[in-house]
Amino acid sequence: MNNSNDSFPLPQRLPTRSNYLKVKENLAPISTGALLYLRGGVTHTRDDTDVEVDFRQESNFFYLSGIEKAGYHILVALAIDKIFLIPPTVSPDEQLWKGIPDSFTELLKKYDADFVLTEKQLPQFIADIDPRVIFTLDTTDVSAIPKEYHGKLDKSRLRMAINEARLIKLPWEISILRYSARISSHAHMSLMSLVGSKNKSLYNEAELEANFRWTCARNGLARQCYIPIIASGPRAAVLHYTDNDRLIPDKSPHTLILVDAGGEYKCYGSDITRTFPLHGKFTEEAKTIYNIVLKAQNAVLKLIGPGVLWRDMHNLVVRVLCYELVRIGILVGHAYELMKLGVYRAFYFHGTGHSVGLDCHDVGGSGIGILTHQIRKGRKGVTLDLNRALEKDMVVTVEPGLYFNDVSIDIWTKNPAYARYFNMEKINQYRVIGGVRIEDTILITDDGHENFTIAPKEVHDIEALMKH
């Protein structure tokens, strides 16, 4: 496995022109006079108030511009590879509240572009070019484009071109993603240490979330890649528990805390999960389930690399989990038969990983999400393709888990067709731990992978970190 060192310093003026050139290549052939137009996100207020909602730039726009602020447009003349920034028009009244905007000279120093246009100049500029086609996304606000050119908008090809480009990361993107994962790993370690130092005190899950966000923010990751999951006790069996508002149950020696959280830097994120014991030491039941999940993850990490099919990695995880659940008596029967029947889904009901980049569940290339958790419609999930091989410079997660979720267990064990495959006495013995997930963000390399995640995950390492 490649253990590359962090690549510092991180770029301040992001070389997003390199992203554009990848997208252009994917758009070929391109007719003469073609333009590419995108409009970034705008600020919104909450309900009918004047309170602004926290702004985060639309990922595709950031990919081509490097602009995190609201209200910008970009226009690209594809024939000559010239990139034009169009900043928002800020009135004197707005400047009073928001400050004086950057000058054109300052904008060109900050962003990888050639020229700056005003919003007032944009319509005439397009008219002067008289393009044959304007590539844009079906989600882009095109109200700034003169109406007579709306018939020349191509909303079908750009998304697939961007998706394919975003899937394979450039070296500077990899440096940022590595940094996001490393700092997020330290935030996970900080939580383990904090809980270990005060494990006799009552915690609210919100306190741990605040500590995680603080550790990220003080190291440059001011924003989270997604809402952190701080799931304690039985809530660790809920996949996307984000309420984070309950007291952590401290009476049971089995209580685990599952933290699925990752910060982002310059819109590039990370996705990491660690599960650790409230009282600083795993009980035998918790250790047994934890080590099964870790065994499944290690099996994938041993084999993953370029040319590997994700379907094979997911099936490997399922095979390990089935054999181990039979070994400890939770499942009854031959592991191969149980895999065919799918009864393992009583305890493992999500995919083994997904791509990571400008979004937590990132695009998958060619309009497909090679690593998404589940089949979902549209861009928000794009369709699952388990048949595409992994490639060098993809960034993905590996995240097996086992969950003793009451709803899932009832669905499977109360079905007469499947009840005989479950040992309820054993299930009740282990369900006190809630759930376990272990998730790393990794880079596919020439000869295997580099693990960006440095938070400990061996039982003895976690217990040592929590011991004070």
Image (cartoon, helix red, strand yellow):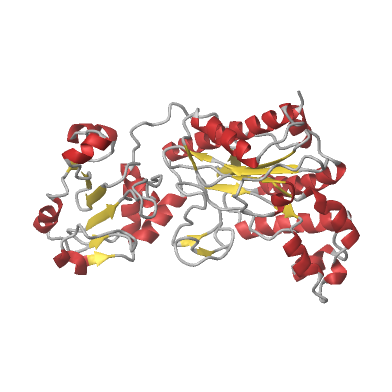
The residue under the point 43% across, 26% down is 9
Using residue 15 as the reference point, say whether residue 436 is left or right of it. Answer: right
Q: Quadrant of residue 210?
A: top right
The C terminus sits in image quarter: top right
The reply to whether residue 447 is visible in this rendering is: no
**Horizontal and vertical percent for residue 359?**
47, 49
Q: Residue furthest top?
A: 468
Q: Is residue 18 left or right of residue 457?
A: left
Question: In this orientation, which residue lies closer to the viewer: 407 or 225?
Answer: 407
Which residue is nearer to you in this view: 23 or 139?
139
Nearer-the-camera pick, 339 or 30? 339
Using the image, determine if residue 378 lies above or below residue 356: below
State the count of labels: 0
Image position of 240 (left or right of 34): right
Quick one: quadrant of the N terminus? top right
134 horizontally vs 406: left or right: left
Judge whether 353 appears above or below 466 on screen.
below
| Picture coordinates of residue 296, whole percent (x, y) | 73, 50
Q: Residue at x 74, y 45 (%)?
A: 294
List x then y, in percent, for residue 360: 51, 49
Give the answer, above or below, for where 187 lies relative to 65: above
Say which quarter of the image contains residue 37.
bottom left
The location of residue 225, given as percent across then percent down, is: 50, 44
Who is closer to the viewer here, 15 or 288? 288
* Visible residue check, residue 420: yes
